[in-house]
Image: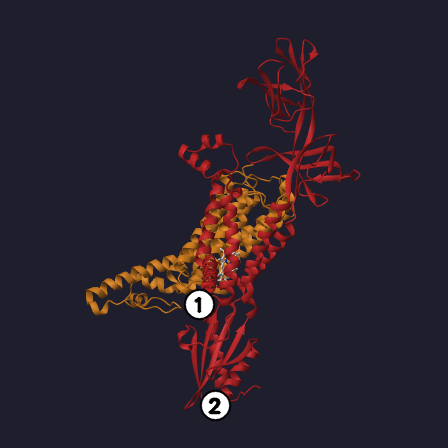
Chain colours: A orange, B red
Amino acid sequence: MSFDQDLILAAISAYIVATLAFFNYLLSRIELSRRIGIPLAMIGCALQFYELVYRGTSSHIWPLTNLYGSLSLFAAMSVLIFLAFSFRLGIWFMGGFVTALASAFLAYALTWNEGYLPAVPALQSYWIKIHVPLVISAYASFLVAFVSSLLYLIKYYGERSLDAKATRAAAAAGPELSRGTPRSIIVGDSPNLERAAASGNALALWLATLPTLAKLDSITYQIVSLGLPLLTLGIITGAWWAKEAWGAYWQWDPKETAALVSWIVYAMYMHLHTRTAWRGLRCAWLSVLGFATIIFCYLGVNIWISGLHSYKM
Amino acid sequence: MASTSAPNLQTRNLREQLAESFDDLLLQLSNFWFGMSLLALWGVMTLIGVVVEQGREPAFYAENYAPALTRLILRLHLDNIYHGSAYIALVALIVACMILATFKRVIPARLPPLHAVKIDKIPLHATIALPQDVATARARTEAFFRERGWLVRKREHSGVEWTFADKQNWARRGVLVAHLGFVLIAIGTTMYWAWGYNGDTTILTGAEVTIPQNGTRLHLDRFAYQIEPIQTRGGLVYQPIDYVSDLHVAPREGALHPAVLRVNAPLDIGGTLYYQSSYGAAVAFALTKDGKPVSGSPAVPLKEGEGFTIGSTARSIRYDRFVATIDRDGRIGADPRPNNPGVVIDVADGNQLIGSILVPLDRDLDLGNGYRLRVGRSTLFSVIQYRHDPGVPFVGLGAFVLLAGLCISFWCVPARFYVRVDETPEGSSVGIAATTVKGFEIFDEQFRSLVAALRGDLQDPSAAPAT
Ligand code: HEM
């Protein structure tokens, strides 16, 4: 097995152990788990970047010209962006999902390893060194935003089930006690969550360790705030490159149109997030939908739909 | 008198009604939810174009899709969705809607006047009770915000003096910048539709073509390509490395001068860009009957897909594809570099394909009835695309303006503090509230820490009132 594959396997192993540690942290909040997860995620990420550099320098071929290289960067950037946001916002509890997804994408990348293949003429451009990392970083940001929306949805539906239970209990206790729970605009945890947690309900105890729904929503928004400008810049540089390589900045190629679909979904996210009624649950679902369009654009189009960007060519 | 003023009144009423309906229409068009529905529809239509193959022949859809789906695709023109009038109209409507929303809604909402508020109705609010008199409390509050770089302004509303402190006020215009960027892109694209053109041309080595739209002449001296065999994990792959056209070019009525055209390095001739697109091998075919040339025999080398009929018969020959390597067993080899080259030709009777034959170059083929086909030498040709797009500067500028607008809108959070100081029996009470353009949660922590700092500042007896 080649050295670069060894590096990838070592990165996957680091991510898998980091995943276990971070999930343990998410469920138990044992500080030691977090302390184990962080360096492992960093080591995996560093190994991945080292592998990319190693492959590039040893073969003199830019390593991002095929799906193997690009998926590898996707996994590494997802972890890197997660780490950067965690140091700023303290979102370590999301780590298990991010490293699990990173290791899954990295393992999948291995199935696309063709060895060293120089780029076809249209890809021999300095633009590949600008456009591809930008787009991949945008995809990676959306992966992290997807994870935080997922946690939002878990917490939201968890709280709702506790609310329903509390309402049923209150209804059984008497009609005068069954009034709904008012919530302020800056939404804190539902009082039912606090009450259930106080009475020892395991789900409530765990949900209470997560940030408030409003905070989770704000975390997703801040990550999308990085992803959407990156995606916009990625589309712009791609258009610029297309103008040099194929003669037109926009050719309605399946890949660029699929990226436009993702861009539209996140532009809607951005607009709808300005509405109080949409902030929170609906925007979380929109972020999930946005990530689905990203995966379709990234893998679906490359693998199933042929076009100028297809890796099948 | 009454008889002359009545029609006037009616006309005025009608005009007023029309103006009112027009205003209603504009208001409706600027509606946020209407705009968002348009964006959603844009996303769906764009997605359809990704999933449904674009620009194919009807037969393709009939072959690959269920009959009902094929009918739907063809009837609704989903096979060419991006150039259909519905798609173009939708994008135009989005631009119109966005412009109207910008003027009718965004500007009033994002640039609010300095007005009084009900402090306790705003989720981010706090009250600080102080022993100092109103004037001191006011001066120190003002100084507190100024020292931290906030823009402090004062207004009196209903006899009460309000202090407004703004941060990143300029960033309130981020939306306008983003929307302007989108409009610039739309303008650039429209300019291409109105005044641009594009096309492609095929030039045989040694031949010259004239571009019909601008009279530019292109002469191909030589075309070269480089293909390398590379051993990959999946087997041997022949990877193209370079395509180069050595040309002589001349703008309309200008003299020819040498130029080299490569992939990724377009040539700009008189504002039109020329791109190396692809290449191929043209092959000379000569048809004879009983040793004499037959009319209809191709006068110029044919390109793949071209053909001719065999004399006065119903039969025809089509040059199907160029084969770079015929292997030792006489079969098509994998190596795309010319090494015992040949062609695959199809022979048809009417529309019926009779068979395909692989023929090496420089060979004769007996077609029967005295007909012989000479498959001659091959000549490389270069396919060059060209495009004149006067909208590019607008699209480029628009893209960066849009990006700047996004960054401003996302990364800068303009916030406004509303402060009123009231007299109390103990001294004064400072009421504070804050709003941002992005809701409250995003500013919650900052608000708390600022209020804590202000409280500390105001309650510190040693601090002198700032001037
Ligand atoms: C259907 C067309 C559109 C309409 C009607 C529309 C309308 C609006 C409105 C009303 C706002 C202000 C929301 C608020 O603060 O309450 C807004 C914000 C914004 N719009 Fe649009 N818009 C449209 C399309 C676009 C497009 C295509 C872009 C391109 C990126 C864009 C970029 C932005 C940005 C960056 C913001 C600021 C968002 C924020 O601060 O979070 N808009 N738009």
Report the side of B354 relative to B210 (left or right). left
Asked which quadrant contains residue B208, the reply is: top right
Q: Position of residue B333 (x, y in %)?
A: 60, 25
Regarding mark 1 in the picture, which secondary structure is present there? helix
Q: Circle 1 is placed at which residue position?
A: B441
- The residue type indicated by label 1 comes to Glu
Q: Position of residue B220 (x, y in %)?
A: 73, 33
Asked which quadrant contains residue B212, the reply is: top right
Q: Is mark 2 within 8 Å of ligand 1?
A: no
Q: Residue at x 49, y 79 (%)?
A: B453
- The residue type indicated by label 2 comes to Asp
Q: Position of residue B24 (x, y in %)?
A: 45, 60
Residue A268 vs A60, above or below: the answer is: below
Between B38 and B237, the residue placed more toward the observer is: B38
Between B321 and B58, the residue placed more toward the observer is: B58
- Using the rendered image of the protein, determine whether residue B405 is visible from the camera's viewpoint: yes
Q: Position of residue B394 (x, y in %)?
A: 63, 53
- Using the rendered image of the protein, determine whether residue A225 is visible from the camera's viewpoint: no
Chain letter for the residue marked with disc 2 in the picture: B
Q: Decide: few, some or many residues near mark 2? Use Cα within 10 Å; few <14, some 14-19, many ≥20.
A: some
Chain letter for the residue marked with disc 1 in the picture: B
Q: Circle 2 is placed at which residue position?
A: B133
Mark 1 on the same chain as mark 2? yes
Residue B279 vs A265, above or below: the answer is: above
Report the side of A105 relative to A245 (left or right). left
Q: Is mark 1 within 8 Å of ligand 1?
A: no
Between B221 and B454, the residue placed more toward the observer is: B221
Is there a contact, CB below 8 Å, between mark 1 and mark 2? Answer: no
Which numbered dot is residue A100? none
